Each structure stands twice: as C-alpha cells, then as structure tokens.
Amino acid sequence: MSLFHPSAEQIDLATVLSVLGDQTRLSIVGYLARNEDFEINCSRFLDLGSKTNISYHLAKLREAGITRTEVRGVNRLISLRRADLDARFPGLLDSILASAAAIPFDMREVARVELRQLERDGEATKGSVG
Amino acid sequence: MSLFHPSAEQIDLATVLSVLGDQTRLSIVGYLARNEDFEINCSRFLDLGSKTNISYHLAKLREAGITRTEVRGVNRLISLRRADLDARFPGLLDSILASAAAIPFDMREVARVELRQLERDGEATKGSVG
DNA sequence: TCAATAGTTCAATGAATTTTGAACTAAGGA
DNA sequence: TCCTTAGTTCAAAATTCATTGAACTATTGA
C-alpha cells in the first residue's frame, strides 16, 4: 500500500545520476520542477510513453529518491524531493534543471490541465473567503 | 590514431549523467579532479578493474565528452574537460565532485606515483632555473 | 453493489551495458 | 631489430534495462 521511498541519507549519487541519465526521466523531472505549484499525477506523462512504461520510470525515480509519490484517492501525486536532494547534493538538481532541454509535450493539453487546476484553486479560495 | 572527442556543443546532458551514473567512472572522475596538476595515465586506475575494463570505461568517459585522452608516447594521458563541461552545464561538475565519495585506492601506490611526478617536476625546475 | 478510473505487477522480449581473455597495435629503448 | 610497455579491439558471456500487453488492485462515485 504505502510505497517505498529511501530516506535522504540513503539517496546515492551514482544511482541518482544513472536514473537521471535517461531522456524520459529527465523530461519528467524537468516538468515537475517547472510545475511545483500544481498537483501532478502519473497520467500527466502519458505523452512520453505507455501507461506501463511511465509507471516503470516513475518507480525508478521514486526508488532513487528523486521523487515522492503520495496516494491521494484514486490518483498518485508525484513531486520532486527538492529539499532532500538539495541537502544531500547541493547545487546538483539546479544545475541539471538549468541544463535540461524543454520537454516535448502537447502544450494545449498542458494548458488545459493547468486551467482546471487554477479553476479548482479559484473555487477553494471563493469558498474559504466568503 | 587520433581519438574521437565530441566538441563542447555536442556534449549531451543525459549522456553525461548516465556515464557518470556508474561508481567506477565516478571514481575515475573524482580522482582526475583531485589530481589535475598531475599527469594521469590509464594504468593509474587498475585498482578499479582489469586493464580491458578500465579501457572500456575510459572510452565511455571520452566519448561522452567528460575526459580528454592525449597520446603521449607510449602513454595516454587522461584529463577532465572541466572548462568544456563548466561552459556547457554550469555548476554540474562541481556539485557532482563535491558529493562524490572518496575513492577506494591503494594510497601507498598513489603516494608513490605522486612522488615520482614531484621528483620529475623538481628536475625540470632545477634545469630551467640554473 | 457495480462500474469506472488510476495505476501496478507480471512475464516475455529485445536492446544495451558490463566484464572477460586472447590477440593485436604502436612507440620507445636496449 | 627485437623486446617491453601501454593500451586497444574483438568476440563471447553475463547482466541489466526498457518496453509491451494482459491481468490485477484499490478507490471513488453512481
């Protein structure tokens, strides 16, 4: 049920580098970094491969300590473990993100996803402010 | 005869990360970084694997653009392409080197190699200063 | 309870990587 | 010229990695 995540101290440099040395996973991490304010679930990455394949790559990222996967109802929300990575390997993630090329995504779908998210946030704000 | 080296612009992030995502190659790079003032040849790394195997790993590093291999007589001198890597991926190499663990080497042999080098430098200085 | 959704696990397959020993090349020194 | 040193190349074996479809699990909502 609960998914394995290595502790910060268990995160290994060679493992992180080899896991990030793959264009699909680099694309996923780049997208997560540029969208830390949004809740991202697995299906957001189906542009990059089949459902099974994305599940495989996300498991690699999680087991390496690069991402966190939390079960939220029927979804799993994926986020970067930025603080843990920065603490363990200062400057590494930032230099990789700065150098990682932009991701080949369908930007209309990206916009749609983000619009839905913003609308949801808007409703939440409306509710709590009233 | 002359060995292939990618140009700085040809160096690819995912390739660099996957090539450095290997403990043997990370050890080689860490050693090169901590000994940039010395001339290092291939056999310096025989602690880490067989001659054939080290040749394989050094070729990977060279083809990824991480090291330069110059033929110097019967030896091949290996050096880090630090300037090229820094220009292409600012901060990446430094953050990796800062996080890379110390290498499991036979430190007596390391000391012997460095002593020989220092003695050679001493002779050169003596000659040029006189 | 039933269906739909989101994602995982499994087994199989193909591709790439790592490791090895044997044979090889090229340069330098006796 | 012959030997030694330094390192490469090749072919084979072992291992690991990536990708796929089919079957599965867990949660939510009707």
Image (cartoon, coloured by chain):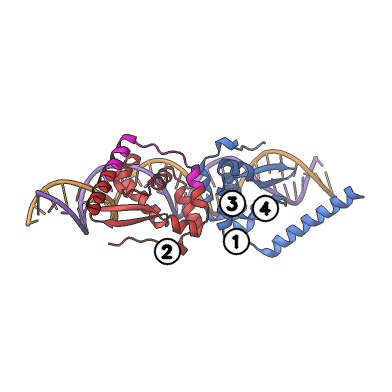
Chain colours: A red, B blue, C orange, D purple
Same subunit, tags 3 and 4: yes
Query: Residue B37, position in %: x, y?
Result: 72, 51
Question: Type of residue at label 4?
Answer: Ser
Q: CA distance from mark 4 to mark 1?
A: 19 Å
| Disc 3, SS | helix
Q: Earlier in the sequence, mark 3 or mark 1?
A: 3
On screen, residue B100 versus residue A59, left or right, reads right
| Mark 4 or mark 1, earlier in chain | 4
The reply to whether dot 3 and dot 1 touch (C-beta < 8 Å) is: no
Residue marked by disc 3: B94
Residue for badge 1:
B102
Q: Position of residue D13 (x, y in %)?
A: 47, 51
Q: Chain of mark 2?
A: A
Q: Measure the alpha-carbon separation of dots 2 and 3.
A: 24 Å
Boundaries of the magenta span:
A95-116
- Residue C14 relative to residue B3: left or right: left
Are circles 1 and 2 on residues that touch, CB within 8 Å? no
For label 1, the SS is: loop
Mark 2: which amino acid?
Answer: Ser
**Which residue does the numbered mark 4 point to in the structure image?**
B43
Query: Count the marks: how many?
Result: 4
Amino acid type assigned to the residue bearing label 1 in the image: Ala
